[in-house]
Image (tube, helix red, strand yellow):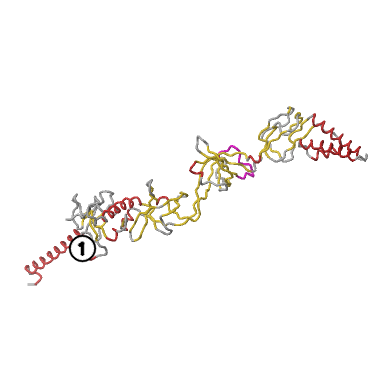
């Protein structure tokens, strides 16, 4: 008989294999039962089997050296004390159960000394989408967006008026909006006073000529003063010197006085018609140069401190989509609107083609420079409680700790840092609220643990 067909021998071999398999399975089960699982954000949650955290729903991760109270003797970290998961003040010197029947959580010496420090496993960091950035220096600029309306450049608007009384003999500008160039005639004025003044001037010229050869110096001086007085009257009436010289050469008395434009521009207001009687000093028309134009916009009170004269501005108008006009802030009005609580700002823009018209609505973006080469952090990295401003700092090796910072002004999606951080430090820009909530719990535990030496708060004994 072949030895491999002996029933007794086959039975012995089979029994040996089953016994070995059974031993291996028990060893595996024992190893599995010794591994505990916890939540990276809620360390008070400890389970014997993998699954999800009952608080936040995140997948539980294996605890390193969990279940072994002597891990400090064989491993990398030493357990300092044990705490109850739900009560930071309930501290024990040995593992076991808390007053609520929950498994105690170990606190290691490497973490206990850090107030509010949190250690997060790399897999948990990935699950909560934790991102970091560095504290760096930037030039901060606040972009202010507002709207307003276009207006005339008041420095390039002038009013035409007559300094003599008379009648409009002829009107060269007979409609509002007409463009005139400097030197163009505007209107002819007939004035009896002008005619009399011309006749007196010619008489003064004849009188001076007649006494020039008399040899009487005093008489000659008196004639010269009379002539100068007559000429000065023409100048007070804004009669050009060319017309005065023409009168001296031709000796012809003109019936009318021609008023001319002193600068180029558009007639924006005409208050006379041909044949109308006018009085000395009466406003006849208004002319505006539109080569540059003003934009008036309103800013809220909290934006006032960021604006300075000279800040660059970019303007767009609905009339010309896609077209941008570059200008600058030229004046900050020294008062606020009592009802709207806004301050008016004036900007100036070049308008060589005169496409921009007064009273057009416009949108404007003002680049208000705040500070240069200052420490900054992204706005989303700051946790603002109303009392304190907190930033979570990445210390390396999966350890995170909160820091209180002093903030400057926000601008362009960043905060200026006035104190609390140094250049190059790594900070958390996402999931920092989860870390902050856990760090507050750890800080309370660290504070309670420091009272172990006090007689009125002894550690619990099992």
In the image, residue 388 lies at what x, y percent?
A: 38, 49
- Disc 1 on helix, strand or loop? loop
Q: Nearer the viewer, residue 343 or 420?
A: 420
Quarter location, residue 46: bottom left
Q: Is residue 384 left or right of residue 252?
A: left
Residue drawn 6% across and 68% down? 8
Q: Is residue 312 left or right of residue 219?
A: left
In the image, residue 11 lies at what x, y percent?
A: 8, 66
Quarter location, residue 455: bottom left
Residue drawn 77% across and 35% down? 258
In the image, residue 124 lies at what x, y percent?
A: 31, 55
Assess whether residue 353 is covered by the magenta stretch: yes
Magenta-colored span: 349-361
**Is residue 59 in view?**
no
Q: Nearer the viewer, residue 252 or 409?
A: 409
Circle 1: is it few (<14), some (14-19), or many (20+) Cα within 10 Å? few
**Is residue 128 in view?**
yes
In the image, residue 20 lies at what x, y percent?
A: 14, 65
The number of numbered badges drawn on the structure is: 1
Classified by dominant secondary structure, the portion drawn in magenta counts as loop
Q: Nearer the viewer, residue 158 or 406?
A: 406
Return the residue at label 1.
70
Assess whether residue 188 is covered by the magenta stretch: no
Q: Quadrant of the N terminus?
A: bottom left
Name the residue furthest right: 214
Q: Quadrant of the C terminus?
A: bottom left
């Amino acid at each position: 008989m072949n030895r491999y067909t002996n029933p007794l021998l086959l039975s012995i071999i089979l029994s040996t294999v089953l016994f070995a398999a059974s031993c291996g399975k028990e060893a595996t089960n024992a190893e599995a039962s010794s591994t505990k699982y916890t939540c990276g954000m809620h360390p008070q949650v400890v389970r014997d089997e993998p699954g999800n955290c009952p608080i936040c729903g995140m997948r539980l991760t294996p605890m390193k050296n969990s279940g072994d109270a002597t891990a400090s003797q064989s491993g990398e970290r030493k357990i300092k004390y044990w705490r109850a998961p739900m009560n930071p003040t309930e501290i024990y010197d040995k593992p076991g159960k808390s007053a609520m029947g929950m498994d105690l959580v170990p606190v290691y010496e490497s973490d206990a000394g850090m107030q509010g420090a949190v250690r997060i496993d790399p897999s948990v960091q990935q699950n909560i989408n934790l991102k970091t950035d560095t504290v760096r220096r930037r030039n901060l600029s606040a972009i202010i967006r507002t709207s307003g309306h276009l207006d005339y450049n008041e420095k390039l608007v002038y009013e035409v008026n007559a300094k003599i009384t008379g009648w409009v003999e002829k009107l060269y500008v007979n409609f509002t909006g007409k463009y005139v160039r400097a030197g163009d005639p505007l209107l002819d004025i007939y004035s009896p006073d002008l005619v009399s003044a011309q006749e007196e001037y010619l008489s003064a010229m004849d009188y001076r000529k007649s006494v020039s050869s008399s040899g009487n110096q005093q008489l000659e001086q008196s004639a010269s003063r009379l002539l100068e007085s007559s000429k000065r009257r023409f100048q007070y009436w804004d009669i050009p010197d060319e017309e005065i010289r023409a009168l001296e050469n031709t000796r012809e008395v003109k019936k009318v006085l021609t008023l001319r434009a002193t600068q180029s521009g558009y007639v924006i207001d005409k208050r006379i018609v041909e044949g109308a009687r006018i009085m000395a000093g009466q406003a006849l028309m208004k002319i505006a140069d539109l080569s540059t134009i003003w934009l008036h916009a309103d800013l809220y009170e909290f934006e006032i401190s960021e604006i300075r004269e000279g800040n660059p501005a970019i303007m767009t108008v609905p009339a010309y989509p896609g077209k941008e006009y570059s200008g600058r802030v030229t004046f900050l009005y020294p008062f606020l609107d009592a009802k709207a609580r806004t301050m008016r700002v004036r900007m100036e823009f070049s308008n060589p083609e005169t496409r921009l018209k007064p009273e057009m609505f416009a949108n404007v973006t003002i680049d208000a420079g705040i500070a240069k080469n200052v420490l900054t952090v992204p706005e989303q990295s700051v946790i603002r409680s109303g009392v304190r401003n907190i930033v979570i700092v990445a210390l390396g090796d999966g350890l995170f700790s909160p820091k209180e910072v002093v903030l400057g002004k926000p601008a362009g999606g960043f905060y200026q840092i006035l104190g609390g951080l140094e250049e190059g430090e790594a900070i958390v820009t996402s999931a920092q609220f989860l870390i902050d909530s856990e760090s507050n719990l750890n800080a309370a535990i660290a504070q309670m643990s420091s009272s172990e030496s006090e007689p009125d708060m002894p550690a619990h004994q099992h």
